[in-house]
Image (spheres, grey):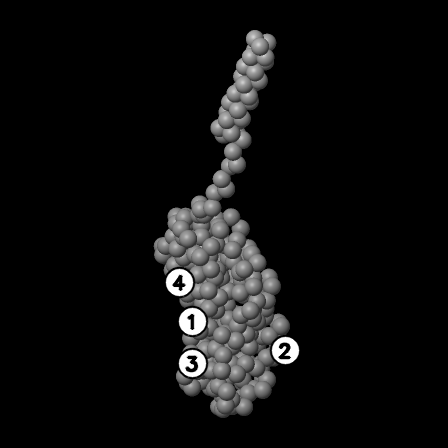
């Protein structure tokens, strides 16, 4: 009987030791799954200066970026690229600059205001915009130089104006516009208001205008394809947010929105 009791005590002791070891193992932090952090660490506010032709796409993309990074805020400032360069060089606070051409971006790079190297993210070409009734019966680029045609174009220092000059030189057609505007949206406004018979804008502006205008493609536009670069600026307060926004524009989501608006690949 005494031997049986001893064996029973040994079994109970072994069981208690096993239970204790199991409890210790479960309490070991290394044995517990590590929780995956879900909060987005990106936070801060940035101001993006972007060419007027980017207004629709960048407004949409800024909203998408903020939704993907709840701790961020994106303020947008749109104007002609040349005007934006002037604002930045005169001290306007900006974290990201998206230009409608490489020439205006180079001005900021040469001034030491660009952080790193600009990267291309889109291309665009010119198209003739007329009212749906096409009052001057424009069909070709040469028709824009016809007698009595009220044509509006961008000023030469603006990317869409520089592209117009290239097309004129390549085609041998000299245009006689009634006005030269500081942004492509101003040109479009002159057409939609009836102040002009036709305007030279980007294909993306025609698409964005919907039924308000009719777009007329012309072969000569291939002589002046504008490449759009984007860059973070040296004075960016939230440089990590600024860089993330640039990468977002060049990423899958950004490229999808730009393509839908009519922009080409860089």
Q: At x 57% / y 67%, what residue is drawn?
A: 259
Tell me the SS state at disc 2.
helix
How many residues crowd mark 3 within 10 Å: few (<14), some (14–19), many (20+)?
Answer: some
Viewer can see residue 207: yes
Which quadrant of the figure contains the C terminus?
A: bottom right
Q: How many marks?
A: 4
The residue carrying mark 4 is 77
Q: Nearer the viewer, mark 1 or mark 4?
A: 4
Task: Classify the position of the N terminus by image quarter.
Answer: top right
**Which residue is drawn at the image coordinates 54% and 90% (left, top)?**
137
The dot on residue 219 is 2
Q: Position of residue 59 (x, y in %)?
A: 44, 64
State the residue in front, 74 or 199: 74
Gap between marks 3 and 2 measured at Cα: 24 Å
Task: Decide which of 245, 197 is in the foreground and name it.
Answer: 245
Task: Name the residue beneath numbered marker 1.
Answer: 182
- The residues bearing labels 3 and 1 have C-alpha atoms spaced at a distance of 12 Å
Distance from Cα at disc 1 to Cα at disc 2? 25 Å
Kindly identify the residue that appears in the image at 49 percent across and 39 percent down.
35
The picture places residue 104, in percent across and down from the top left corner, at: 49, 61
Disc 3: which residue: 190
Q: Position of residue 91 (x, y in %)?
A: 36, 54
């Amino acid at each position: 009987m005494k031997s049986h009791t001893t064996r029973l005590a040994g079994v109970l002791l072994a069981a208690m030791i096993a239970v204790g070891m199991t409890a210790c193992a479960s309490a070991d932090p290394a044995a517990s799954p590590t929780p995956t952090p879900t909060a987005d660490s990106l936070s801060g506010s940035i101001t993006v200066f972007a060419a007027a032709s980017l207004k629709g796409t960048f407004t949409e993309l800024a909203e998408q970026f903020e939704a993907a990074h709840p701790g961020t805020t994106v303020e947008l400032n749109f104007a002609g690229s040349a005007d934006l360069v002037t604002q930045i060089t005169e001290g306007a606070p900006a974290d990201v600059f998206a230009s409608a051409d490489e020439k205006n971006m180079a001005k900021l790079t040469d001034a030491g205001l660009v952080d790193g190297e600009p990267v291309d993210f889109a291309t665009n070409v010119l198209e003739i915009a007329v009212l749906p009734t096409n009052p001057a019966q424009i069909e070709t680029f040469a028709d824009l130089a016809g007698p009595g045609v009220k044509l509006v174009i961008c000023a030469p220092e603006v990317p869409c104006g520089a592209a117009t000059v290239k097309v004129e030189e390549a085609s041998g057609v000299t245009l006689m516009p009634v006005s030269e505007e500081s942004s492509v949206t101003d040109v479009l406004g002159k057409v939609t208001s009836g102040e002009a018979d036709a305007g030279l804008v980007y294909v993306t502006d025609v698409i964005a205008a919907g039924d308000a205008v009719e777009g007329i493609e012309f072969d000569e536009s291939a002589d002046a394809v504008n490449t759009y670069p984007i860059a973070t600026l040296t004075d960016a307060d939230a440089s990590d947010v600024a860089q993330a926004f640039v990468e977002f524009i060049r990423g899958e989501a950004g490229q999808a929105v730009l393509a839908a608006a009519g922009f080409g690949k860089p």
